[in-house]
Image (cartoon, coloured by chain):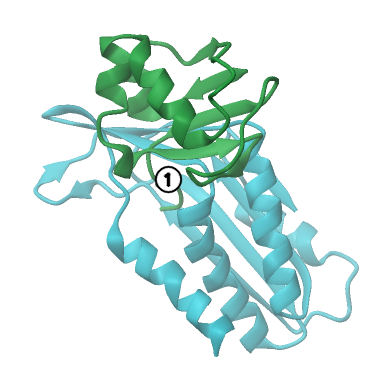
Amino acid sequence: MIKVQREDFDVGAELERLTAGRRDVGGVATFIGLVRERLGDATVAAMTLEHYPGMTEKQLAQIEAEAQRRWPLQASLIIHRYGRLEPGERIVFVATASAHRQAALEACAFLIDWLKTKAPFWKLEETGAGEQWVAASESDDAAAARWIKKVAE
Amino acid sequence: MKILYFAWLKGKVGIGEEAVAPPAEVTTVGALLDWLATRGPKHAAALANRSIVRVAVNQEYAGMDQPVKAGDEVALFPPVTGGL
């Protein structure tokens, strides 16, 4: 399931819903991304996430379908927020449920790495020096690329 | 054809969206970017460094050789930075 929303989410309630009524799930892996205050030497007062409505949902659905294709998942969930967020606030939530832990853990790591380089979101950071758009990082590309290699093998 | 700009591209061009009717010889993404850059100094500045501009045609990522036609929704934006 994909949710793109401005408002915060309740981690417990979302996890409850993910596996409610199921008896075939052996493990649930989760990842929660938060706004971090430190940006190199600067302090981030807030960040505003802009996205491309329509394409965001489409890309996230494709990413989720890819995870479902690669791993035997009973359920999966991606929640990504947009708008202005302050340090400590939740940005993204990824949860994967499978019969066994390895599939759940791997699929969760894949989803967060993959969405960072595929989902059309951009971050505008507010620091003491003003507002600045965050540049894409090479380490994010490398993190996503390791999943491409795994396919080639 | 609808053109959308996001993040710093929107700031540089000065608008988030515009309807355009490029000449008939503009049939690919690459040719469209060349043509958009001639629309004014702001467009030219925003498109000066193509290596940091990503393109989506009808909400799917597109390369410079991808065909474009009337009625398409073409989005221009920087490399994405979602997640944490």
* Residue that badge 1 annotates: B80
Q: Position of residue A47 (x, y in %)?
A: 34, 34
Q: At numbered mark 1, what does the secondary structure look like: helix, strand or loop? A: loop
Asked if residue B63 is positioned above or below residue A51 in the image, the reply reads below
Q: Position of residue A56 (x, y in %)?
A: 61, 41
Q: Position of residue A134 (x, y in %)?
A: 28, 41
**Rendered residue at 28%/44% (across/down):** A135
Q: How many marks?
A: 1
- Is residue A83 among the parts visible in the rendering? no
Task: Indicate left or right for A140 with A8 as reference.
Answer: left
Q: Nearer the viewer, residue B54 or B22?
A: B22
Question: In the picture, which chain is cyan?
Answer: A
Q: Colour of chain B?
A: green
Number of residues whose C-alpha sits closer than 10 Å to that of mark 1, classed few (under 14), some (14–19) or many (20 or more): many
**Rendered residue at 47%/16% (across/down):** B16
Task: Name the kind of residue labelled 1 in the image.
Answer: Val
**Rendered residue at 52%/53% (across/down):** A118
Asked if residue A103 is positioned above or below residue A37 in the image, the reply reads below
Asked if residue B13 is positioned above or below residue A83 in the image, the reply reads above
Which chain contains the residue that carries disc 1? B
Residue at the far front: name it: B25
Task: Indicate left or right for A132 with A104 as reference.
Answer: left
Q: Position of residue A102 (x, y in %)?
A: 62, 88
**Rendered residue at 54%/20% (across/down):** B3
Q: Nearer the viewer, residue A82 or A119?
A: A119
Quadrant showing the N terminus of chain B: top right
